[in-house]
Amino acid sequence: MNRDAATLAHPASPHRRRRWLVVAVAALLAAAGVLAATAHLARDAALDALRERGAADLRLYIANVRRELEKYEYLPALLADDARLQRLLGKPADFASWQAVNRYLQLAAQTSNAAEIYLLDREGTTVAASNFEDMDSFIGDNYRFRPYFQQAVQGELGRFYALGITSNERGYYFASPVRVDEAIAGVIVVKVAITVVERERGGGDREFIVTDPNDVVFLSTRPQWRFRTLAPLTEAQRGRLRDTRRYPDRELKPLVVRHRQSVTEDTTVLTLDDGTSYLRQGMPMFAAGWRVHVLSDTAPVAQQVSRSVMLAAMIIAAAGLAGGIVVQRRLRLRDRMRFEHAAMEAAAANEARVRAVIDNTRAGLVTLTDNGYIASFNPTAAALFGRAPASVQGVHLAALFERGDAERLAASLDTATRESAHPVIEVTARRGDGSQFPVEIAVSPMELAEGRRYLVTMHDVSERKANEQALRRAHDELEQRVAERTEDLVAANRRLTQEIEEHRRTEAELIHTRDELVQAAKLAAIGQLSAGINHEVNQPLTAIRAYADNARLLLERERRNEAQENLSQISALTARTARIVHQLKVFARKSSGTPSPVSLPAVVDAALALLEPQLTRGGVAVFRHWDSAPLICLGDMVRLEQVFVNLVGNAVHALADTTEPELHITIRRDDARLVATVRDNGPGIDAADLAHIFDAFYTTKETGQGLGLGLSISARIIEEMGGTMHASNHRDGGAEFTLTLPAAQPEDGRDE
């Protein structure tokens, strides 16, 4: 394409470019304005919908709370009419009356599901309570400072909500005066647990809170918001709360709010310190003196705004695309006319360029007439054959090749005419000097204005033939080497297979030997315990024989009651002996090897029970440090007992020369693992021994007191259960062994 054609095909117009730039900027500004307006309208609509749904949920929640409290409002007045309460207030020293009222209040609390019910005298002292059997019973406590007592002694129905002074549990209190001969002699109080209303509708995308007149959050479906304030408290407010002791020992810190945005008079958008944004709506509960709030998560609002903006953007993009298509079609039509003119000028230049390519290509190109005679001969073909183009023009192509290849050339011309494929054939050509050379030929038909022509492409393949022969020789040599190497590899593979099989047999024997060694270690431990166990078994047997002889004499003298007591003692001693034998049997049995949930405290207790004679004989004080929560690990109970028997037995041996021997066993949970430590206050472990303490056959005991396998086997057992075990010296003195084991998933406990 010449310069004029390129100018026509790609016209440059700075004025047109500036005009399109202005149009594009204006369109972008208009689209931005539409998207901003869409976002604003979508946010207002989403907030309105969220506010309406929050108001409905708020009314329903208030109705549920009111219904839950009204179930107990009648109960104090009903109980106040009972003659037993009136009689106790008249005679508080009557024990029978006191006990009857306590039982009555206990039954009433259980029947009505009230948290507590208690009776106060005229001075506000509790004289009877439904929890009279509990350690933290209300009996004897004075509650005259409580507003519900002050309201009730005035003859009104008392109401109050606060934390319990004794129980530290939140509750709503109803109080009614108890009249004796028309005079107020005391107050009956019903405490209602209000935690049930917190679980009514909380969670998900909305939370509920209930505040008192001081804006203290008393109820909340989000536990971390309880006893927080919506605004900082003044000193006067704090003084009133201290007088009524409504929230004893609570700091009442404000709820941290990053940002507040007022939407309406009763609606505010709050952004908390964790970045969560809520729409807060409130409504009063006049009877209870509360204000109930619902906090709705505003994340759906942002999602609605995003969807609306995306939809608007898609509409704008579709409109812009449609306009662009129209403009593009007009531009294409104009450019097509310009390109057609340029193509006509380029055709002539292209024909000259093709001729130059043919003349300068490295392949021999020959054009033939429709009957196989040479029409043209390019310079490369002339060089291949050593003939001038003029000398071969008009000569049949078969004259340039060996006679045997003439038929193949004729077949190639016929195939090129009938089929679309152009096969490549290899023939032998003759140069002008009579020499021969191999050549590849491909024939392609051409339909020109003057009729059908053939284009024959030729490549001298003399060099390739020589390379193929060299490659064939190299291939034969490589095949021979591969065969020899394969034979060597087969022999090596056979030897490797034999070695692997031998390794497997050795590994199986090692596992069997290790298991037998574990069992032997158990039996060795039982042998070491035999003296203490012999004493523990002989002592009950001696006592059984004495009790049996005494029982026989008592029966002869017809003193049956005393004989029965002796027989009961014999039964208890038999059970004790059976328990000792059972512990030995459990410890001695072989492990199944299958991990299962195991209570680690139960394993420790079993090991301590097995070693109790040694601990008692050595005067060792055992301290257990773990709480009542389930401490379950994944392991093998039998093998774990052996580990703790080894550790505790070693500790008893180390404490032999200690004045006041102590053994501390601690179990705690650390995320997904359990950590157990066994510590004594003995001399500890020498620094030189710490590096080898878990090596097999390494022992610090005297000759004949151990093989040095206990700690090595114990460490191996813990590792096979997916845990770790290491030894150290405690900073307060003594040796300390620390075990970690994978924790099993504990069963879900009930809420207390």
Image (spheres, rainbow, N blue to C red):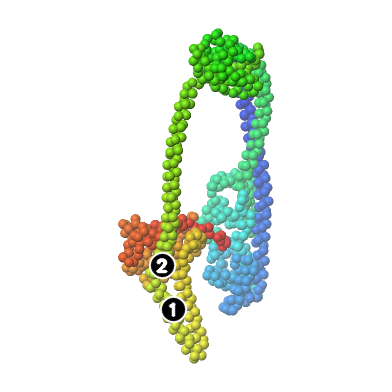
Q: Nearer the viewer, mark 2 or mark 1?
A: 2
Q: Residue at x 43, y 69 (%)?
A: 610
Residue neighbourhood size for the residue with mark 1, other residues' Cα within 10 Å, grouped as few (<14), some (14–19), many (≥20): some
The spot of residue 529 in percent (x, y) is 39, 70
Is residue 413 among the parts visible in the rendering? yes
Q: Residue furthest front?
A: 404
Compute the Cα span from label 2 to label 1: 24 Å
Q: Residue at 62% of width from left, 60% of height from top? A: 196
> Residue 111: horizontal and vertical position, in percent?
64, 69
Name the kind of residue labelled 2 in the image: Leu
Q: Which residue is mark 1?
A: 540
Of callouts 2 and 1, the N-terminal one:
2
Q: Say left or right for 264 vs 489.
A: right
Crowd around label 2: few <14 · some 14–19 · many ≥20 (10 Å) = some
Q: Which mark is residue 523?
A: 2
* Quadrant (top left, top right, bottom left, bottom right) of the N terminus: top right
Residue 451 image position (x, y, % from top left): 66, 13
Q: Residue at x 62, y 32 (%)?
A: 32
- The answer to which image quadrant residue 587 occupies is bottom left
Residues 559 and 269: in front is: 559
The one of 233 and 266 positioned closer to us in this rendering: 266
Give residue 199's quadrant in the image: bottom right
Farthest residue toward the top?
Answer: 390
Height in image: 324 above or below 673? above
Amino acid type, callout 1: Pro
Classify mark 1: helix, strand or loop: helix
Q: Nearer the viewer, residue 196 or 352?
A: 352
Q: Which mark is residue 114?
A: none
Picture coordinates of residue 517, whole percent (x, y): 41, 62
